[in-house]
């Protein structure tokens, strides 16, 4: 176990927590909707940004050398793919626990196809973001059919908040606060 990490939850603990949360939110739907905690990016110099959260979370991003970065940290796009991969893996585990499926091993890989002309604004017809995303799940369970595992992964992808947010049109509100002095 790595330093600073707590012991992983057991399948039974996950199933119990999901059951309790589902029961509570079913009875109190008004408490299900909330504003997520912020991620605050501060430009540190060049294209390096330090991102922090309200609980002391911290990560560093940079851009590739080809567009002026120094590549000393992963790009924001890589963190998006990492968020999607880890979210899907977590939801596979949640759904497996809730349905009594034992997972022997799971690895989720997310990659995407992009066109840098979009991010650089060279062609207004090319999106700045990914053109396509691919999810590859490598899963093994000695007691579940291939179709059952496929259903488990499909459920996780369908319910992953990260995947859902990037696949549908989500309103974006932009507030600009200009510092003076």
Image: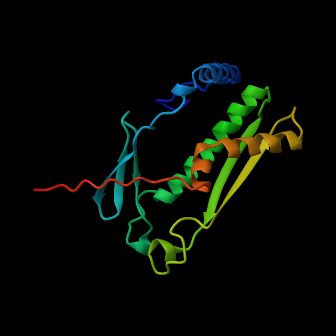
Direction from residue 81 to residue 122 in the image, left or right:
left
Colour scheme in use: rainbow
Residue 149: x and y in percent read: 82, 41
Direction from residue 116 to residue 92 in the image, left or right:
right
Residue drawn at the location 58% of the way across and 69% of the way down:
114
Near-viewer residue (2 or 83): 83
Residue 136: x and y in percent read: 72, 53
The answer to which quarter of the image holds residue 27 is: top right
> In the displayed structure, would residue 63 be above or below residue 90?
below
Q: Kindly give the residue lying farthest to the front in the view shown.
A: 30
Near-viewer residue (36 or 31): 31
Q: Kindly give the residue lying farthest to the left in the view shown.
A: 181
> In the displayed structure, would residue 18 be above or below residue 42?
above
> In the displayed structure, would residue 131 be above or below residue 60?
below
Near-viewer residue (23 or 78): 23
Residue drawn at the location 45% of the way across and 54% of the way down:
172
Direction from residue 112 to residue 38 in the image, left or right:
left
Image quadrant where one finds the N terminus:
top right
Image quadrant where one finds the C terminus:
bottom left
Residue drawn at the location 66% of the way across and 41% of the way down:
159
Residue 17: x and y in percent read: 63, 21
Residue 134: x and y in percent read: 68, 59
Q: Kindly give the residue lying farthest to the bottom in the view shown.
A: 122
Residue drawn at the location 46% of the way across and 81% of the way down:
122
Q: How many marks?
A: 0
The answer to which quarter of the image holds residue 110 is: bottom right
The answer to which quarter of the image holds residue 61 is: bottom left
């Amino acid at each position: 176990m790595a330093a600073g990490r707590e012991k992983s939850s057991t399948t039974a603990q996950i199933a119990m927590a999901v059951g309790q949360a589902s029961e509570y939110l079913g009875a109190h739907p008004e408490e299900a909707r909330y504003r997520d905690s912020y991620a605050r990016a501060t430009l540190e110099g060049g294209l390096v940004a330090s991102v922090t959260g309200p609980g002391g979370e911290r990560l560093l991003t940079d851009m590739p050398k080809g567009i002026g970065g120094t590549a000393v940290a992963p790009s924001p796009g890589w963190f998006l793919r990492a968020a999607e991969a880890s979210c899907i893996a977590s939801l596979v585990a949640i759904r497996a626990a809730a349905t009594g499926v034992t997972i022997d091993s799971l690895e989720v890989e997310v990659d995407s196809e992009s066109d840098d002309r979009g991010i650089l604004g060279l062609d207004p017809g090319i999106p700045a973001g990914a053109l396509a995303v691919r999810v590859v799940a490598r899963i093994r369970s000695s007691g579940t059919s291939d179709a059952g595992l496929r259903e488990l992964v499909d459920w996780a992808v369908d319910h992953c908040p990260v995947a859902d947010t990037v696949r549908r049109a989500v309103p974006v509100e932009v507030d600009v606060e200009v510092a003076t002095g």
